Amino acid sequence: MIDLHSHILPNLDDGAKNLEEAVEMCRMAAEDGIRILAATPHYRPNVYENEEKNIFSAVSRLQEVLDRKGISLKLVPGVDILVSPEVIPFLERNTGLTFGGRYALVELPAQFVPPGIEDFFFRMKLMGFTPILSHPERNAEIQNNMRILEGMVDKGVLVQVTAMSLTGEFGDHVGVIAGRMVKSRLAHLIASDAHSPRHRVPILSRARRTLEDLVGHEKARMMLEETPQRILQGESIEFSRDAEDLITPLSILKKLFRKRLFS
């Protein structure tokens, strides 16, 4: 499996607090069957000012430790960028933090969707950057109106759902919303968004079982292996939606949840 979202680098943001935690998280990921892990610390203006230079250096240092300890895990550099006017200038001076030279992990504020977000993502694409929207299932406004996300996806935005959301570890409501996104083809890949070896862990296997229950083995494999690999290689990712992909009613997902698909 390939995990394209983790806060694994020590002392760069609200993720791993030290090298020991970082190594333990990497060990957990490798033992879970993850073979490639993207280290994606936050970039938030005036809060976490991470750029190529310090991220590349931190990835290199951690990879050396993993290799020395015999932990079979390949790290790749990336960044998790909060939507702001700084995104495009940041990417233009830090293209090495995109995946495959074109894909950029972007997150929304937790409580709302900024006005004009579709135009913002369109401008990103005009500049050669394809947004991967991270964990929209945890955004309050999207939870109440899935059509917002549908509009983004129809305009070429890729969506990453967090593994622990899908398994209900962020609560039943978020679990149902995440499942609804998957069933409605509004999600393209699953990542851990790991922050800790204890509470927000780099584990994908539990989400894989849930995915297989929801959409079958082949689509689960695509979301956890094939699509992330193609993103890393900079290949075009095209997903079509048709009449069969209408947003799955919440009532159906709640029934699935009660059947412990998310346990």
Image (tube, rainbow, N blue to C red):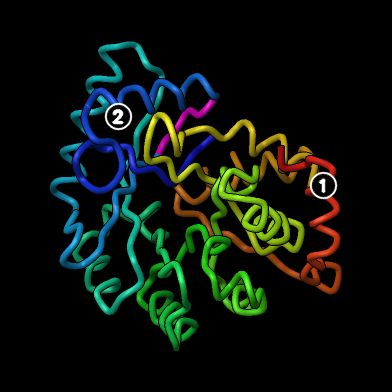
Numbered disc in front, either 1 or 2: 1
Q: Residue at x 46, y 34 (%)?
A: 201
Quarter of the picture holding the N terminus: top right
Cα gap from disc 1 to disc 2, whole angstroms: 35 Å
Name above or below for residue 15 compared with residue 20.
below
Q: Which residue is mark 2?
A: 22
Question: Is the C-beta separation of discs 1 and 2 under 8 Å?
Answer: no
Q: Residue at x 73, y 60 (%)?
A: 180
Residue 34 in magenta?
Answer: yes
Marking on residue 49:
none
Q: Position of residue 198 (x, y in %)?
A: 42, 30
For the residue pair 93 and 256, the one nearer the viewer reads as: 256
Label 2: how many Cα within 10 Å (few below 14, some 14–19, many 20+):
many
Q: Residue at x 31, y 42 (%)?
A: 15
Three-letter amino acid code at disc 1? Arg
Q: Which residue is mark 1?
A: 258
Span highlighted in magenta in the image = 33-37
Q: Quadrant of residue 119?
A: bottom left
Q: Residue at x 52, y 45 (%)?
A: 191
Q: Quadrant of residue 58?
A: top left
- Is residue 221 rendered to the left or right of residue 122? right
